[in-house]
Amino acid sequence: MKILVALKQVPDTETKIKVGAEGRSLDPADVKWITSPYDEYALEEGLRLKESKGAEVTAVSVGPEKAKDVLRNALALGADAAVLLKSNETGDPLAVAKTLAIFAEGKGFDLLLFGNKGFGADNGAVGAMVAELLGLAQANLVTKLELEEGRFRAEREGDGGTEVVEGSLPAVITAQRGLNEPRYAGLKGIMAAKKKTIEELEGTAVAATLTVSALTLPPTRPEGRKLDGDAAAQASALLGLLRDEAKVL
Amino acid sequence: MILVFCELQNGKIRKASLEALSEARRLAGEARVGALFVGASCAGAEDAAKFGADLILKAEAPVLGAYSSDLFATVVADAVKARGASVLLGAATPMGKDLLPRVAAKLGAGYAAEVTGLSMHGNKLQALRPVYAAKAFATVDFSSEVQIASTRPNVFAVTECSKAGTAEALPAPTADFKAIVKEILAKSGGKQDLTEAEVIVSGGRGMKEGANFQLLEDLAEAIGGVVGASRAAVDAGWGIPHNMQVGQTGKVVSPTLYIACGISGAIQHVAGMSGSKVIVAINKDPEAPIFKLANYGIVGDLFEVVPELTKAAKALGITK
Ligand SMILES: Cc1cc2nc3c(=O)[nH]c(=O)nc-3n(C[C@H](O)[C@H](O)[C@H](O)COP(=O)(O)OP(=O)(O)OC[C@H]3O[C@@H](n4cnc5c(N)ncnc54)[C@H](O)[C@@H]3O)c2cc1C
Ligand SMILES: Nc1ncnc2c1ncn2[C@@H]1O[C@H](COP(=O)(O)O)[C@@H](O)[C@H]1O
């Protein structure tokens, strides 16, 4: 079985957001870069399948040179191969999806694993787009995955509660928290990863369908009001304010 | 023409879909708006005319009774092409978020997820959307011919605007599906999904144990809300399912009222709820960071305050 895992390098989720001088993107000064949290579940699932069923796991990232860090980490965790598709992030999920689809096309991957959402851009789109571009089945927000004989059964967080999606392989699965507990890289893995190579390819140039023209900070919420009195007085004051001042009840 | 993918629930158009439809009507100006329904039965779709739909498109077929990402995407993309629509909107519901990116890829269309603002400049759409877990907002401009956006629930107003609303049936899909929803395991018991809820009462580690969430259920029932939780509460082994978790690794919610009980206000929790219109915090620690965000704060013991709130709400007969 051949598995592809798409990993995105993103700012640490605790990053204090500062807008860059051009007003369109994040100021990269002082930003610590990490693997997008949901992508860790995707990678872990690939590694577990490798261990339980035997699979070759390829990690791929679309990004600049520094995105090699997430690939190096994936190798340390147990991925067999890592590929960097060099390209500068445009903020267009379809452009990223096309770059990934062009790379994956014809390589015989049985399973393509994604995070359900990349932190930062928060699109929640690239997995489904790749599925469409390659004409594959998809299941998003998956919390449990089973594979057998060319088919998958996935439990996902859907509308009515937990939904069971069944479909054919090859398929795109996007990971949700709960799918597994990601492992940490051990010293042995880190040392071994240093000897493995990260393949670097020029990402295919694809036209953007949308561009970010401005990045702004949200208005700060005005300091709220604390309510006095005992519990009963606070409760009735609050309900009054919610009904008459905020008009939300 | 602007098309809106609309969802029905128990024979009624979902509120989040009505929001998208109302916004489409506003954006369209003199241009036509079409409401698109897909399912085994589209009974109730006619109501779309009251919210500005000139055209009501119904793709009705038994095979559409269960959701399939790829088959639904084919049906929706075909409708966009057949009607020559330049904009497709849909609500950022679980289905909308699953379907619309796939449709975008099929049509080579730009896709802006969970937008909180939209405007038309000539025939080009511009969208405002939260990024970095709502710590910033991006203005995005489309350059594709077809332009697709999902609208974040509870952000756009529902506006009535009666139109003639002629109904038309779409051809039954001929393609087969690659994946489909086979069954629904843990039903959410008719409860609204957190992402669409207008009122959310959330509990955190301060709830002490799972059974105490009944206090929140009681309050939620009294004010017409649903119950959410922090990750600490979900991870505590209290039997609180992950689909109740609000935050960066849970749901991003946008209710008009969010009541946080025994939640400190960690950055990852705030990431999921800072889009709430009005925030109330109940916490015994006056220094808890959640108070920085809250419009109304109650410093106190939630085990005293929450039952008083429920009692007072019942007495006032408040329900949404
Ligand atoms: C990568 C990552 C992702 C994360 N994702 C999420 C996420 O999606 N959602 C999320 O919520 N968290 C998330 N977290 C965890 C987050 O950092 C916090 O640990 C968590 O939100 C804390 O939950 P809490 O506020 O319930 O608990 P605590 O921080 O322990 O706060 C409990 C609060 O209850 C108050 N309290 C106690 N007893 C009472 C009482 N009787 N009456 C009133 N108040 C009382 C205390 O004063 C305290 O403020 C994530 C963390 C990481 C690292
Ligand atoms: N630049 C990228 N390189 C590799 N994978 C990506 C990239 N951007 C997004 N992805 C994958 O697509 C998922 C969803 O991203 P998004 O649609 O941007 O929220 C992520 O969790 C990754 O698995």
Image (cartoon, rainbow, N blue to C red):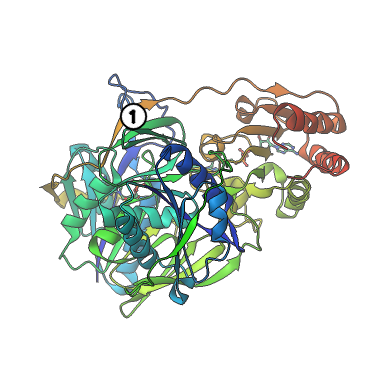
Q: Give the vertical position of A217 relative to A43 (above or below).
A: above
Residue B228 at x, y percent in the picture: 63, 48
Residue A217 can be seen, yes or no: yes
At x 27%, y 54%, the residue is: B107
Tell me the quarter of the picture where residue B206 sits.
Answer: top right
Q: Which chain is mark 1 on?
A: A
Residue B293 at x, y percent in the picture: 60, 28
Foreground of the two, B145 or A229: B145
**Quarter of the C terminus of chain B within the rendering:** top right
Q: Which residue is mark 1?
A: A31
Q: Residue furthest bottom?
A: A149
At x 35%, y 23%, the residue is: A19
Foreground of the two, B151 or B284: B151
At x 33%, y 34%, the residue is: B140
Tell me the quarter of the picture where residue A247 sits.
Answer: top right
Residue B247 at x, y percent in the picture: 53, 43
Secondary element at image label 1:
loop
Badge 1: residue crowd in 10 Å (few <14, some 14–19, many ≥20): some
Q: Amino acid at mark 1?
A: Val
Ligand 1's image quarter is: top right
Left or right position of A16 against B237: left
Left or right position of B105 against A235: left
Q: Give the vertical position of A15 relative to A152 (above or below).
A: above
